[in-house]
Amino acid sequence: MIFDRTVLWLTMRQLFARRRLVLAIAFSLTPLFISLIYRVTATDADGAAGDFLAGLVREIVIGTLLPIAAVVFGTTAFGGEVDDGTLIYLLVKPLPRWRVVLSKYAVAVVATVAVMVPAVILPWLVVRTPEMSVRVPLGFLAGIGAGALVYCAIFLTLGLTTRRALVAGLLYVVAIEMVLSRNLSGAKALSVREFSITIAQSAAQTRLSNLPVTLATAWTMGTLMLVGAMGLGIWKLRKYEVAERL
Amino acid sequence: MTSRVELKRASRWYGNVVAVNDVSCEVGPGITGVLGPNGAGKTTVLHMIAGLLRPSAGEVLIDGQPSADNPDVYRSLALVPEREAVHPFLTGLEFVRMSAQLQRLSDVDAAVARAIALVDMSSAQDRRIATYSKGMRQRIKIAGALVHDPPLLLLDEPFNGMDPRQRLHMMDVLRTQAAAGRVIVISSHILEELNDLATNVLVMVAGRLAASGHFREIRRLMIDRPHTFTVRSSNDRKLAAALLGDESVFGVELTEGGIVVRTADRGALTRQLPRSARTADIRLLEIRPTDESLESVFSYLVDR
């Protein structure tokens, strides 16, 4: 087993502390409210509901909610324990450190996707027309899942690298995902958002973006970034030393 | 189950700060105290033994095996860290159970119940750790460490935050563990804490091993050193003259802030001083040891 059950359980408890749970629920319901407003105000036109859902998923869910959820869960998976020193209780156990990293990573990914499921399914239920089969939201979720895998690897490692991981992660999202990759087409090959959109639209067979990166680019770059970030994270924890506060 | 800890010329530095400098020693069954002022490198030594810090030079071995990068040593080793923080959202029971599960014990429930009972925390085990007092946190940390019956137990300042009753109880627990043949290493910056507890003491000063040996021997060295007191009275000059007649006094100096008295025998002086004052009809206003700071005690040991 590459995961440790007890570390999974502990990380779950850490990530879903009460206050964060309330925020996560509010977060995952935001797209529902937007689509309810759309449902009440929009006049029916051909394909308009499809366009609305695509825009909602592209901009709000994949473009904003996914990276923020991944930053929060990814950086907290380790960040809190490094800060308060409780990480030591996992390190002095007969358990290889790579397994600690993989277990924490798995929980961060699952938590991120869990928040995204209602954010996609509920709006689809509200605005769906007969042409929008269940394949559409499931396809979107596949792309989101792929995005969560890469994002969480990056942010988990960030949590092991800096004490200000949350701020650094948000800066990363704003700089790379929101500004650079939207305005500089070359930077798209480094954008997890673009990979996510490409995989989502291919899985859902629904157009999300007019200028997507190719599927091959998305898979290759996504895998490279994931493996690179996880490798670095495992290396960081293996090298991690508990320093005396001098 | 005997364990043996060996430091062979172990040093550790952080950048250009040397925390531990060329320490060699061997620790066997029983209770060993690591004594020294704050910042002397006690925690660094404990963390090196626990494999959480790699020595920058030299070796740290447990039963002949290096402890760093070797998760298997944690089957026979436990560390109670100094930092108070324990996952605040867990209950005491959940914390100890987590330790037991991570150790992959066969009978988790029995081990957890035994460890919690050992530190007398059964009645508070279902409360969240966030609600615990300092002493309770310390005890639940020790329960988490003892849950897998480790032959080697490292405790970093374990008595911090405990009230005297809890301290006595914890000493009993540790003595029982030592009697069972465990190797127990306790760090402390207070000599008296290790009284009646540690049989052997390693004294660390500024990263070096300044002295090591039997507790009573070290204690005698530290207590029977020359002491200096500052005394203020209603008539300093007359009192100074009276004190010079006392055999335990080997120096008296009149200063603006009172008289500075040097003695080789602190006990004799503290008995004699009030008598001399009363005989001479002088009122004592203040008696203050001048050099009681730990640093001066320890540096005396080093300069000896």
Image (cartoon, coloured by chain):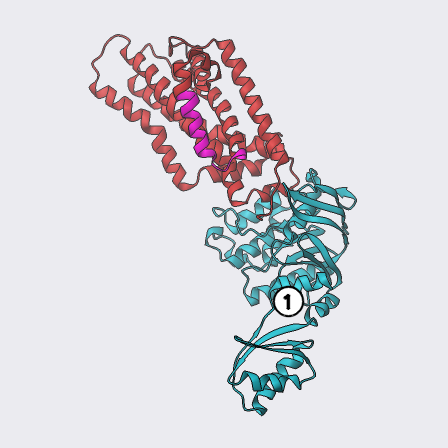
Chain colours: A red, B cyan
Q: Could you tell me which quadrant the N terminus of chain A lies in?
A: top right
Please state which of residues B248 and B164 is positioned toward the viewer in this rendering.
B248
Could you say which quadrant of the image residue B171 lies in? Answer: bottom right
Q: Per the image, is A219 magenta?
A: no
Could you say which quadrant of the image residue B57 lies in? Answer: top right
- The picture places residue B60, in percent across and down from the top left corner, at 74, 45
Q: In this view, does B210 lie to the left or right of A135?
A: right
Please state which of residues B55 and A4 is positioned toward the viewer in this rendering.
B55
Work out whether B17 lies above or below B261.
above
Q: Mark 1 lies on which chain?
A: B
Amino acid type for the residue under numbered disc 1: Glu
Residue occupying the point 48% across, 14% down: A189
Work out whether B11 lies above or below A66.
below
Could you say which quadrant of the image residue B59 lies in? Answer: top right
Query: Which residue is label 1 attached to?
Result: B192
Residue B147 visible to an observer of this rendering: no
- The picture places residue B45, in percent across and down from the top left corner, at 68, 49
Residue A225 visible to an observer of this rendering: yes
Work out whether A74 lies above or below A178.
below
Q: Give the residues in magenta.
A: A160-178
Work out whether B288 lies above or below B177.
below
> Dot 1: what SS?
helix
Residue occupying the point 67% across, 62% down: B298
- The picture places residue B105, in percent across and down from the top left corner, at 65, 44
Please state which of residues B199 and B237 is positioned toward the viewer in this rendering.
B237
Q: Per the image, is A174 magenta?
A: yes
Q: Is residue A26 left or right of residue B64?
A: left
Overall secondary structure of the magenta section: helix
- The picture places residue B209, in percent across and down from the top left corner, at 72, 55
Q: In this view, does B292 lie to the left or right of B215?
A: left
